[in-house]
Structures are given as C-alpha cells and as structure tokens.
C-alpha cells in the first residue's frame, strides 16, 4: 500500500501541472484587460500600457507561462493579488479552512441522510418507503443550488429571522450554506446506495444469512451494506471533491469569504494570480480526496488490499 500511495502521489505532479497550464491558458485568452480593469475607465492608454508592462502582460505567452510555472512550483512563490495587493498564500491560509469546514459539514449531512434513505429504498423496493426516498432523491437532484439557497434565505432569514443570511461567525452561519450544499449529495448517495444494495441483497449469501436466523438489521448492516460500500465510497469521495469546487456559488450567495468566492472574485476582476493559484489548490485537494477514496477501498474490501500487496510483491520479484 505504501508503494501504491507514493506512486499515486507522484501521478499528482503531471495532473497539477496540466491544470496549471490549462487555467493559465484560459485566463490568458479570455476577454478582458486586467490593466484596464485595475485602472478603471479614466486611465489613459499610456497608463494602461505601463501597467501591462509592469505586470508582464505584454510578454510572449511562453515567457509568461514559464515564469508562472517556475515561480509557483520551483520557487514556491504564489504571488499577490493584483487587486488587493495581499499575498495569495495568506488569503488561502485564511479562506481554505472555511471552505473545508463547509464542505465537510455538507458531506457529513449527505452521508447521514443519503445512505439511510438508500437502504430504506432498497429494503422496501416497490413499496411506500422506496417511492418516498426515490421521489426525494429526484427532487434533490433537480433543484438548482442557487435557487434553493435563495429560498432558504427568504424563509429562514427574511420571514422567520431564525438564521443569518450571510457572513461568517458561529455554527449557525454554516447551517443554510450546508443545507444548500448537501442537497445534491443526499440525492446522489440515496440513488447510489439503493442501486448497490439491490445488487447485494439478491445475493446467495444474504439468503443464507437470513435462513440461519440472523436478524434483518444484522443482515443489512453487517453483510449487505459492507459489501455495497465500494460504489458508495466512490460517490462520497467524488462528491467531496466536487463540493470544494462547487462551493463557489454557495459562498458567493451567502457572502462566505472562502476559496470559492475568492476565485469567483478573481475571475470577475481578471485577477489572474488568484484564479490560477486557487485552481491549483482545488486540483490538489481533489486529487488527494481521490487518493483517500482508493485507500478506503482497501479498508472496506480486504480483497483489494491483497491485490495491491500482491502487485507490489510481483514487481519486487521482477526486479
């Protein structure tokens, strides 16, 4: 497993480099002049050209790309925001924990609600419990996140005045954003858990366990769910990585100063360093979450762990 983990970590290098090059290229050729935006509409052409020279925007594409990659990955110089002049590493250190907190809370709610709903739907296939869980999953997958966020604000903040509508503070500031972020995750986990459980509970060993008098709860939790975990873990890991990137809209609506709103602000203001470095950090986090998913595979299924171990032994013998 250690050899496999190291190999996966090494594979992250070309992935992160590819993301860095792609984002840099997209920001370079997208419409909008950062110098003109920074100086507002009252600046002269001479002032704009002077600022472009100062920012290196007039250099050839390959020269700028080489400077960016060298400063970021060799010198570990993340630079500063063109708009605020604040060091990007300081902003990330402040904002990333908020995005992580919101993502983890949303993920925990998704797991705590989605998996039990999926189990109920599978156990009661074709009956009322299945129909209700399937309908809730369909509704959750169909509701746009920004629309749900606005509805929650109108109900709990404007009408009932129970929860704050924006900003950061205590736990109550994360309730509405977390409910917005977990809705799609609940729907996805419900459908995936139902599908996985239906495949497992029809197996012969489940019938054998029931014939031996094992309680239904024990059959579902210790036998069926354990063997249905692999696709569920995949959905959980993928959803967590997507939530970190998908928090952009949620953080913007609820005015949460996290990584999502930071990158959105950088895109709107053509603040290239913010968008580039922020995207690289999200790519790293997503890659690490996928690595954790693979390691959880081995924890959930001993056969996968044995396969990793046998593969490593064969490579050692070959050498």
Image (cartoon, helix red, strand yellow):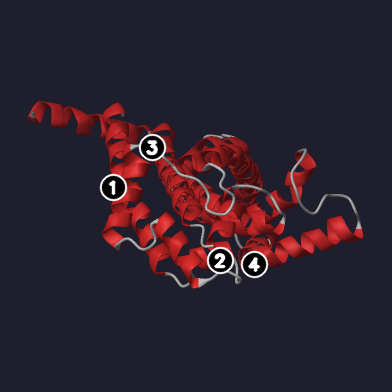
Write the residue at 76% across / 39% down. Answer: 171
- Compared with 186, 225 (above or below) is above
Instruction: Give the structural element (helix, strand or loop) at label 3.
Output: loop
Residue at the spot of label 3: 76
Instruction: Give the structural element (helix, strand or loop) at label 1.
Output: helix
Of labels 3 and 4, the one closer to you: 3
Task: Work out how far the residue at label 3 is from the one at label 4, CA to CA, in angstroms.
Answer: 38 Å
Q: Position of residue 253 (x, y in %)?
A: 70, 59
Tell me where residue 74 sits by quadrant.
top left
Residue neighbourhood size for the residue with mark 2, other residues' Cα within 10 Å, grouped as few (<14), some (14–19), many (≥20): some
Residue neighbourhood size for the residue with mark 1, other residues' Cα within 10 Å, grouped as few (<14), some (14–19), many (≥20): few
Label at residue 14: 1
Label at residue 37: 2
Q: Position of residue 38 (x, y in %)?
A: 56, 61
Q: In the image shown, does 111 or 28 lie closer to the viewer?
A: 28
Residue at the spot of label 4: 144
Task: Work out how far the residue at label 1 is from the one at label 3, CA to CA, in angstroms.
Answer: 17 Å
Q: Going by the image, does 287 lie left or right of 8?
A: right
Looking at the image, is mark 3 or mark 4 earlier in the sequence?
A: 3
Instruction: Give the structural element (helix, strand or loop) at label 4.
Output: loop
């Amino acid at each position: 497993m250690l050899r496999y983990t190291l190999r996966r970590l090494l594979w992250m290098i070309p992935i992160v480099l590819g993301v860095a090059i792609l984002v840099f290229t997209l920001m370079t050729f997208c419409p909008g002049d950062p110098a003109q935006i920074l100086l507002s509409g009252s600046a002269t052409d001479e002032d704009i050209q002077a600022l472009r020279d100062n920012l290196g925007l007039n250099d050839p594409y390959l020269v700028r790309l080489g400077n960016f990659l060298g400063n970021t990955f060799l010198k570990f110089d993340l630079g500063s925001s063109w708009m605020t002049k604040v060091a990007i590493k300081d902003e990330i250190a402040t904002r990333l924990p908020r995005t992580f907190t919101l993502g983890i809370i949303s993920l925990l709610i998704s797991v705590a609600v989605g998996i039990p709903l999926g189990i109920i739907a599978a156990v009661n296939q074709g009956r009322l419990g299945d129909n209700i869980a399937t309908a809730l999953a369909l509704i959750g997958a169909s509701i746009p996140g920004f629309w749900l966020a606005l509805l929650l604000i109108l109900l709990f903040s404007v009408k009932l005045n129970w929860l704050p509508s924006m900003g950061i503070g205590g736990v109550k500031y994360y309730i509405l954003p977390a409910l917005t972020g977990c809705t799609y995750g609940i729907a996805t986990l419900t459908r995936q858990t139902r599908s996985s459980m239906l495949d497992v509970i029809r197996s012969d060993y489940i019938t054998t366990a029931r014939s031996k008098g094992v309680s239904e709860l024990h059959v579902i939790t210790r036998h069926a769910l354990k063997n249905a975990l692999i696709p569920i873990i995949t959905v959980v890991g993928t959803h967590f990585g997507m939530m970190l990137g998908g928090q952009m809209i949620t953080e913007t609506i609820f005015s949460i100063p996290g990584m999502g709103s930071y990158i959105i602000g950088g895109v709107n203001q053509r603040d290239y360093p913010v968008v580039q470095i922020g995207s690289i950090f999200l790519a790293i986090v997503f890659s690490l979450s996928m690595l954790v998913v693979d390691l959880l595979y081995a924890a959930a299924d001993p056969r996968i762990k044995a396969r990793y171990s046998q593969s490593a032994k064969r490579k050692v013998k070959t050498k």
